[in-house]
Amino acid sequence: MRQLIERDLAVNWHPYSQMKLSQPIPIIKGEGAYLFAEDGKKYLDMVSSWWVSIHGHANPTIARAVFNQLNTLEQVIFAGFTHQPAILLSERLLDLLPANQQKVFYSDNGSTAVEVALKMCLQLGHNQGRAKHKILAFKEGYHGDTFGAMSVSERGQWTSPFSDKLFDVIFIDPPSTLNLEQTKALIREHAEDIACLIYEPLIQGAGGMLMHSAEDLSDLMAFCRSKVILLVQDEVFVGFGRTGTLFAADQLSIAPDVMCFSKGLTGGTMAMGITTCTNEIYQAFYSDEKQKALFHGHSFTASPIGCAAALASLEILLSADCQQQLDSIHKKHLAFLDKLMLHPKVQQPRLIGTVLAFEYHTAEQDGYFHSRQEFLYQEFLKRNIIMRPLGNTIYLVPPYCIKEEDLEYVYDMILEVLDR
Ligand SMILES: *Cc1c(COP(=O)(O)O)cnc(C)c1O
């Protein structure tokens, strides 16, 4: 594989874009929580390969479902036609979501699931003859890399080349730091013109695994609802068990109007996106007037293979074994958190479900913004662990199938790296 890599054609892998010299690690096989490299090394995938492989790699149940689907129907145009896996998945998913979620819109990744949600909310007012133009979003949020998704995400180095092309958004503090009274005043001022609030519930993933309480988020959601602002809940990262419940929605006292899913949806097997919505929203698009339709269709919309993978992944997720694993990972994280609390280099240790995170802090690093990221990444790699710190935030997002002894090994190695 070396010669192939040296041709340097597929360059997405540069771990941190400025690291021109770093070489990717060729991976030839995956199994459960492990990834096997060409040189014989075996790595523990503690980021579930960018948070998607919730059941680990090469899961045989999902593989069988995909194989059977490939032999039956691999793809069909999803306009004017439909197929059984898409219908079954819609039914299965809606059964598990808050009762107000009644329609499913398929696309093919997390960013497009968000684009669809934003278009739904903006076009809704348009269809009803009272268009609203503003969108509310959380600071330090992340919703994807397409233009709409970038617009509602935290702006930074990575969006600055496009800043004049991104639409206006009212950014508010996330619930953990928000002054509710001040924010309510700001929302009240623009309420008539705000189409929706988009947010990552409970955990802002890419922003640094920032966590907030379900109560604080629910309070804000309730206020927005009272102002007829639609609630768009981006569960692309947290959906499918990550926060300890099937969906973050299960911990909130208000049901959202629109929900976005991807990442764990297919157990990390296929790229797929889903946006669900209420019947009220759907009705505003269902019309004899053609221009009221939501014109958004991707070539691989509702891929039968993706749907088959998602159905299999859901079955595994709902099994008693997997639910038991979620619980046991959480309890082990909790015990490790007690140890971390006492460590002088650890700040803000935090935990929701199977996501554990903390800030790495040393006195000498003051003034060197994010300077430890590459160091930490390499130290864990040397110990056969894949972890990708976000700045100085060290986090664990393990596949649910991880073994107890592997988790213990990772905890030990974290303490060892901290003591270096
Ligand atoms: C990853 C992510 C997205 C974007 O999903 P992609 O499939 O990478 O486009 C959107 N929202 C959240 C919360 C995410 O974590």
Image: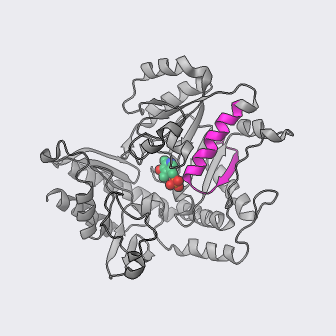
Q: Report whether 300 appears left or right of 213.
A: right
User: Residue 349 at x, y = what percent?
Assistant: 27, 46
Residue depicted at 80% across the width and 39% down the height: 291
Asked if residue 16 lies in the magenta stretch, the reply is no
Q: Report whether 411 appears left or right of 279.
A: left
Q: Does 313 appear above or below 116?
A: below
Can residue 98 be seen here? The reply is: no
Q: Does 147 appear above or below 48?
A: above
Q: Which residue lies furthest to the right in this view?
A: 288
Q: Report whether 382 appears left or right of 226.
A: left
Seen from the viewer's position, the closer of residues 243 and 162 is 162
Query: Which image quarter is the C terminus in?
Result: bottom left
Q: Report whether 279 appears left or right of 58.
A: right
The colour mode here is: one colour
Which quadrant holds residue 312? bottom right
What stretch of residues is rendered in magenta?
Answer: 99-125
Query: Which image quarter is the N terminus in?
Result: bottom left
Asked if residue 124 lies in the magenta stretch, the reply is yes
User: Residue 170 at x, y = what percent?
Assistant: 50, 29
Seen from the viewer's position, the closer of residues 328 and 134 is 134
Which quadrant holds residue 179? top left
Residue depicted at 69% across the width and 27% down the height: 131
User: Residue 125 at x, y = what percent?
Assistant: 70, 30
Residue depicted at 57% across the width and 74% down the height: 63
User: Residue 337 at x, y = what percent?
Assistant: 27, 50
Which quadrant holds residue 378? bottom left
Count of marks placed on residues? 0
Seen from the viewer's position, the closer of residues 326 and 126 is 126
Can residue 56 be seen here? The reply is: yes
